Image: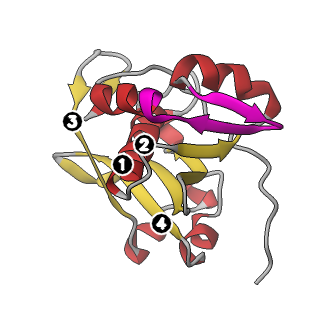
Amino acid sequence: MRRKTETGLDFLIDKLTNSIENVITGDSFQTEISVVTLNDLKLITKKNGWLFNWKDEFIEPAREIYKLTIINNLKIIQGLISLEVKSDCVYMHLVESAPFNKGRSKMYSGVPGNLVAFACKLSFQRGHEGNVSFQSKSQLIDHYEKSLGAIHFGNRIMIINTQAALQLINRYF
């Protein structure tokens, strides 16, 4: 299988919310995170505005793909995250908001923060004390330090440690 090199994550934390928030009304909606299914992949395509090829992520045996949905509207995916449980942490490969949750005309804010908080929660569940790592685009290192409390470990490697993970989890869960 052809391996792609990791170019670094480039998601923006638009706002840390308590769930996700309608940009126009400010209403907050409780969310649920569940595993992506083959059926979901039929709608998660570049043709439908998604940037990444989530089918490639789905077939990677070590990776788990999760979707964020609103509790009473489970058919509409708000965002996706690709995670790998490693020996010492949970590694984030990809994070993407749904096409309608990007840019100036986005519908909901808080999607990326919600997904990262889930990665931290999964890290605790898998015995890694909330530690999450990922590779960042160079220009976003400072953004992740400020918005997520991530630590710049060197090169473009970022770490969310136990303390920062607990803050994110307490906000979203």
Pair 1/4: label in front = 1
x and y percentages locating residue 129 in the rendered image: 41, 45
* Span shown in magenta: 150-164
Mark 1, residue position: 124
- Local SS, label 3: loop
Q: Which residue is rendered at x = 24% and y = 24% of the image?
A: 28
Mark 3, residue position: 30
User: As displayed, is residue 46 above or below residue 1?
Assistant: above
The amino acid at mark 1 is Phe
- Local SS, label 1: helix
The amino acid at mark 2 is Gly
| Residue sitting at the far left | 72
* Residue 152 on the magenta span: yes
First of labels 3, 4 by sequence position: 3
Q: Which residue is rendered at x = 83% and y = 37% of the image?
A: 155
The amino acid at mark 4 is Glu
Q: Nearer the viewer, residue 89 or 18?
A: 89
Gap between marks 1 and 2 measured at Cα: 5 Å
Mark 4, residue position: 64
Mark 2, residue position: 130
First of labels 3, 2 by sequence position: 3
